[in-house]
Every structure is written in structure tokens, then in C-alpha cells.
Amino acid sequence: MGRGKKDENKIYLTAEQRQRLEDISRNGHAPAKKILHAQVLLMADEGEGATRHWTDEEIAAALNLHRNSVGRIRYRFLRQGEHPALNRQVRATPPVAPLVDGHLEAQIVALCCSEAPEGRTRWTLELLTQQLKARKIVLQISRETVRRTLKKQATSLESRTLLHSTTGLATFCGSDGSGFRPLQQRTHS
């Protein structure tokens, strides 16, 4: 990846690979990064189908990239293959931790499904937010966070009934009594 390319760092694309990369770079339907990476690989090709032998510096200048970026794309292609070289790496964890975990989500849903306060016919987002703070379930929460949590649960709540157990944990069961299960914390994938 230094100034010159060693023989082991040269890319030799097959006709099939070249065709796939050309399709990606020309169709305009792929993400911009994927198109850019395909163009880098096509320009870096030194096989029989290549029209010109480009250096990393020339590729970088032509595509407005840094030379090291070109080298990383080339290295990833040679070591890991076509798919990792073209596609962005998926994050293992989200950049920001979720505000509402499974336990808090269950408490919000349980509060929403409980009887409305005296003098009210139903819960509003503002009432839910105030009650969560008053019961010291959370120190701070916005109406929007409560709304998103309830919206996410709306489809599962339509066909289920909330039951309260003696342990204080809320559980859901179907209207026919089937599927009795405790609320669980969701795993993020």
C-alpha cells in the first residue's frame, strides 16, 4: 500500500467480476460509496480486460479520494473479496445507546394500559410523561420518546391483553388466554 504496488497487491479481475462492477458503477441505483468502490476496483484492475494501468495516486486524483482510501479498498478486495470491498461494514453496536430498554418499555406499556387518572377518560402522552416522572420510573423523558415507544408496541398490543402478576411484572396473553408470557427485553440486531 506504499508508493508502489507489489505483485501480491495487484488486482486481476475476471470477466464476470468486471461485468458486475461495471453494472454497479453505471446503473446509478447502488449507494454512492458502493459505486465509488466499484470504480476504484475497475481502475485498479491490471488484468486482460483493463484498458489502462492506473496507479493509486492517479485513481485517487481521478475520483477525488485519498491515496490511502484507494489502498484500503484494494487491500480489502484482495484479502476479503468483492462483497466486503464494495459494501460498508455494518456496526456491531448503534452509535447511540437506545433511550428505552425492554424494562422501561414494559413499564410504559403497563402504565398506558392501566386505568386513567381520576377525572380523565384516557391517558395522554403528557399525562404518561408526568406519571413516569412522578413514580420515579425515570428522571427525565420526553413525550416523543413515550410516543415512539407506544407506536412500536401498537401492533403487538392490538391482539393482546395486559395482565398484572403478583410479582409486579407485566405479562401479555392473547384474548383467548393463549401465549401467556412475561415481557422480555428486546435484543437489538
Image (tube, rainbow, N blue to C red):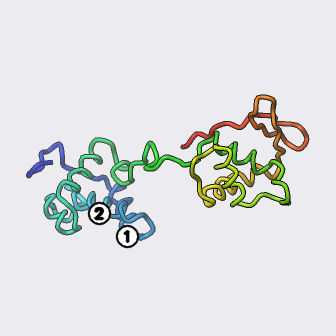
Pick the residue in front: 22 or 150: 150
Instruction: Find residue 39 and name its label.
Output: 2
Say whether residue 104 is left or right of residue 32: right
- Which residue does the numbered mark 1 point to in the structure image? 26
Residue depicted at x 44% and y 42% = 92
- What is the number of callouts on the image? 2
Instruction: Find residue 109 and name its label.
Output: none
Say whether residue 116 is left or right of residue 5: right
Say whether residue 134 is left or right of residue 140: right
Residue depicted at x 43% and y 64% = 30
Say if 9 sits above or below 39 in the image: above
Mark 2 vs 1, N-terminal side = 1
Q: Residue furthest left?
A: 3
Label 1: element kind: helix
Label 2: element kind: helix
Percent position (x, y) of residue 4? 9, 51
Say whether residue 100 is left or right of residue 49: right
Pointers 2 and 1 in contact (C-beta within 8 Å): no
Percent position (x, y) of residue 165? 81, 32
* The quarter of the displayed image where residue 49 is located: bottom left
Residue depicted at x 84% and y 50% = 115
Percent position (x, y) of residue 171? 78, 37
Give the residue type at disc 2: Gln
Pick the residue in front: 168 or 148: 168
Percent position (x, y) of residue 82? 35, 49
Residue depicted at x 72% and y 58% = 127
* The quarter of the displayed image where residue 152 is located: bottom right
Quarter in which the C terminus is drawn = top right
